[in-house]
Amino acid sequence: MTSRPLQIALVVGEHSGDQLGFKLMQALRALSDQPIVFRGTAGPAMTREGMTSLFPLDDIAVMGIAAVLARFRTLYARGWQVIDAVVADPPDALVIIDSPDFTHAVARRVRRRLPDLPIIDYVSPSVWAWRPGRARAMRAYVDHVLALLPFEPAAYERLQGPPCSYVGHPLMERLDELRPDAREAALRDGARPQLLVLPGSRTSEVTRLTDIFGKTLMRLASLIGPFDAVLPTVPRHAERLRQATAGWEQRPQIVTDEADKFAAFRRARGALAASGTVTLELALAQVPMIGAYRFPGWEAFLAKRLVKAPFFLLPNLILGREAVPELFQEEVTPDNLAASLAPLLGDTPARAAQLAAFAEIDRLMRVPGETPSQRAAGIVLETIAAKRKARG
């Protein structure tokens, strides 16, 4: 006799969530002793795994205050479409994946109508950095948080949030793509260093940092001599960056393909990077770096008063100390950046210290015996079973 399929609703709000979602789907199918039917919202990767989305993900995959305001009516309508679909045919669990502004609004309203439905949040919002009261508020509508960063469970306990488990970061499943082989390691240690230039993926970051990074490369050349520069970016910024870098004395090679990006990571001796997930990619690739971040004046004013985290770079947050130099706002000048970067490209104590710190990050982030997707899937199934048992 065939067992009843398990019904799991997955809600993603952008394409990074789609990447997590499709791996979770694969892991759930592998671990479950029942067939599984998935429904909700999906991007291309989840669709290829056999899930039909309620609507195209691009309807809600927006970023930034201006974009959200411009699409507010669509976002509002799509949110209620998801809520109504879940409530009309209750699944065995709801898993919300990242995009907290959208997915948490859905989860809160679903919980009011289906109080016994297991709700799992895959990717913690940054409650440890700002608006910490969100953690405690989440207890009302989230049964378990699946964290990507190893310090997050302790933060949820401190902030009296729902149960939280570290499942591992998806980058840990891609270490072979990030780490050099013997030939690439030799290129990394060659006489002419290769530098990664990473001014960010958001238009605002690229606009604020590109010119400063170009002047930094000019200063750096006067300090260390010849080097090669590679600037990985997303396709939508490629032409803008080609024009912006055309007059640089140290003109970088611009790459847009992800495979080319990771190949550059494997050969790079150092990096100049905007704050973001890329700094964790660099740490796992064992590429010493400095991190920079600049806000418009009013955003910097708010950030200094609202953000509670002691650091803004992920490697430093994971370690609990400033292993990677952080330059913020008025500190982000070509002279400061070049002076901080130059020692990392030679055989120096500063370089050795960062490499030792990255080895520590590697240890902290590993999940023995399981991939992050497998661990996440196991907790989803355990949460469903626990809820069923509690209901009797």
Image: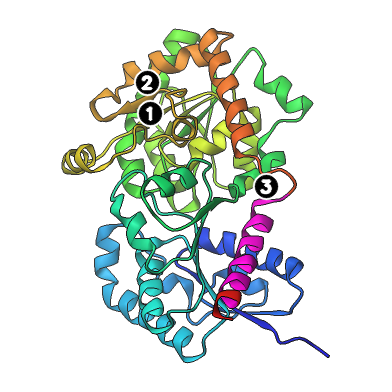
Q: Is residue 261 above or below residue 15?
A: above
Residue 121 makes an appearance in the image: yes
Q: Which residues are magenta?
A: 370-388
Crowding at mark 2 (Cα within 10 Å: few <14, some 14-19, many 20+): many
Disc ID at residue 173? 3
Front of the two marks 1 and 3 = 3
Tell me: residue 321, above or below residue 110: above
Residue type of the residue flagged with mark 2:
Leu
Amino acid type, callout 3: Glu
Q: Main secondary structure of the magenta part?
A: helix
Labelled pair 1, 2 in contact (Cβ < 8 Å):
yes
Q: Going by the picture, which residue comes out furthest to the right? A: 1
- Residue 357, position as x, y percentages in the image: 55, 23
Which numbered mark, 1 or 2, is in the foreground of this view?
2
Q: Nearer the viewer, residue 108 or 69?
A: 108
Q: Is residue 376 above or below residue 225?
A: below
Residue in view at x 42 percent, y 10 percent: 222
Residue type of the residue flagged with mark 1:
Phe
Regarding residue 194, the answer to whether it shows in the image is: no
Q: Is residue 91 above or below residue 255?
A: below
Residue 50 placement: quadrant:
bottom right
Q: Which residue is mark 2?
A: 337
Kindly state the secondary structure of the residue where label 3 is placed: helix
Q: Mark 2 or 3 closer to N-term?
A: 3
In the picture, measured across the screen, residue 247 lies left or right of residue 349, that is left
Indicate which disc, 1 or 3, sits on the residue closer to the N terminus. 3
